[in-house]
Image (cartoon, rainbow, N blue to C red):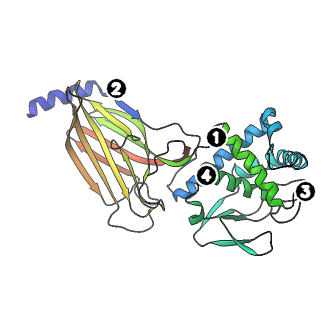
């Protein structure tokens, strides 16, 4: 393409700046929590399950029909059903108080496994533990919880939050008998099972976890400026969730910023962030590639790409402590983006590899 034709096309793109195409191609989520810095993905998944628990507790607290059905399980006798029902409705408000707000119970991830006392009085390996009563965090063993699906995580944290909730002046432990139950664990697990059942039926929890990364971008052509927010579904490359890719304009679940130049051509921002070890140490495989691409759609539907500008960074703007901003320019077009945060979700079609 000669320079005169390029300038004609570029002038026409200025006229079309206000019809920028922004595509958010991601699936509907069941909920999440935006965080300012990207922490361990497992931690973010726990927070997503917390959100699902909060929303389900609100259903239980406010919908009489759901209250009537709570703890109606074939494995329980009539006395156990009634006790479980009354017990959980009495602690619902306390669980809500403990799970949200400025003083909410925190999650702590542990690398080393830990043990709790089992019903036989002997130590047993556990995925989670907490102190009885409102004080202290809920501790989670990272390797134990990293492969759990959302409903299993929801069950796990619903169990732990019951240990921290006041039931008629006491805090229910796992091993002592209570009411018609041989031990507290049976009661707590029955209540957690009912909560998960409601969460699934009401769409508060999905079948997979996912993370969406959020970026704020400023697009500038000459004196024309527009601010946009795009969302990318993070793709994990390893089972331990330490290696991942976050991008725009590359994968089907990416948000896209595209500027039309003609009926079949557009200028597009593409960036690909490759993270090898969850921001834990300097690594030569960590890099960010930023490009401005011209795409042309042919009559047969095929798409051809031409890279107009390319920049490579040995940094990940998602990592805590990094420079969250990155930019690229070509001719009179400039993209300046900043990582805003990450949204942990539970979804039936989350982008996990």
Instruction: Check residue 169 in the rendering and tell me which mark sits there, or answer none.
Output: 3
- x and y percent of residue 229 in the render? 43, 38
* Label 4 crowd bin: few (<14), some (14–19), many (20+), radius 10 Å: many
Q: Can you identify the residue that label 4 sits on?
A: 47
Q: Residue furthest front?
A: 74
Q: Point out the tag, 4 or 2, that comes first from the N-terminus.
A: 2
Q: Viewer-proximal residue, 71 or 30?
A: 71
Q: Which is nearer the N-term, disc 1 or disc 4?
A: 4
Can you tell which mark lies on residue 204?
1
Q: Quadrant of residue 89?
A: top right
Q: Earlier in the sequence, mark 4 or mark 3?
A: 4
Q: Which residue is mark 2?
A: 18
Side (left or right) of 285 relative to 163: left
Q: Residue at x 25, y 42 (%)?
A: 292
Quadrant location of the N terminus in the rendered image: top left
**Direction from residue 233 to residue 148 in the image, left or right:** right
């Amino acid at each position: 393409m000669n320079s005169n034709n390029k300038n004609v096309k570029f002038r026409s793109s200025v006229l079309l700046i206000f019809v920028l195409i922004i595509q958010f191609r991601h699936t509907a989520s069941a909920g999440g929590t935006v965080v300012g810095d990207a922490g361990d993905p497992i931690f973010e998944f726990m927070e997503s399950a917390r959100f699902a628990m909060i929303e389900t507790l609100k259903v239980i607290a406010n919908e009489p029909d759901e209250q009537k059905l709570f703890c109606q399980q074939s494995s329980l006798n009539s006395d156990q059903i009634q006790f479980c029902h009354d017990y959980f409705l009495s602690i619902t408000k306390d669980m809500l108080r403990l799970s949200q707000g400025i003083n909410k119970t925190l999650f702590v991830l542990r690398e080393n496994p830990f043990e709790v006392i089992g019903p036989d009085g002997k130590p047993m390996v556990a995925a989670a533990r907490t102190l009885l009563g409102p004080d202290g965090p809920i501790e989670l063993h990272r390797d134990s919880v990293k492969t759990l699906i959302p409903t299993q995580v929801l069950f796990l944290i619903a169990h732990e939050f019951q240990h921290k909730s006041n039931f008629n002046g006491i805090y229910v432990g796992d091993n002592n008998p209570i009411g018609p139950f041989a031990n507290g664990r049976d009661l707590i697990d029955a209540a957690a099972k009912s909560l998960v059942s409601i969460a699934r039926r009401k769409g508060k929890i999905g079948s997979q976890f996912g993370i969406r990364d959020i970026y704020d971008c400023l697009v500038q052509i000459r004196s024309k400026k527009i601010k946009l927010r795009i969302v990318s579904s993070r793709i994990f490359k390893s089972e331990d969730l330490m290696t991942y890719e976050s991008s725009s304009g590359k994968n089907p679940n990416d948000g896209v910023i595209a500027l039309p130049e003609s009926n079949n051509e557009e200028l597009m921002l593409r960036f690909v962030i490759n993270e090898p070890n969850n921001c834990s140490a300097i690594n030569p495989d960590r890099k960010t590639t930023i490009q401005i691409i011209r795409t042309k759609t042919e009559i047969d539907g095929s798409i051809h790409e031409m890279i107009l500008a390319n920049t490579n960074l040995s940094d990940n703007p998602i990592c805590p402590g990094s420079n969250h901003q990155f930019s690229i320019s070509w001719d009179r077009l400039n993209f300046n983006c900043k990582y805003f945060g990450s949204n942990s979700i539970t979804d039936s079609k989350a982008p996990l590899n």
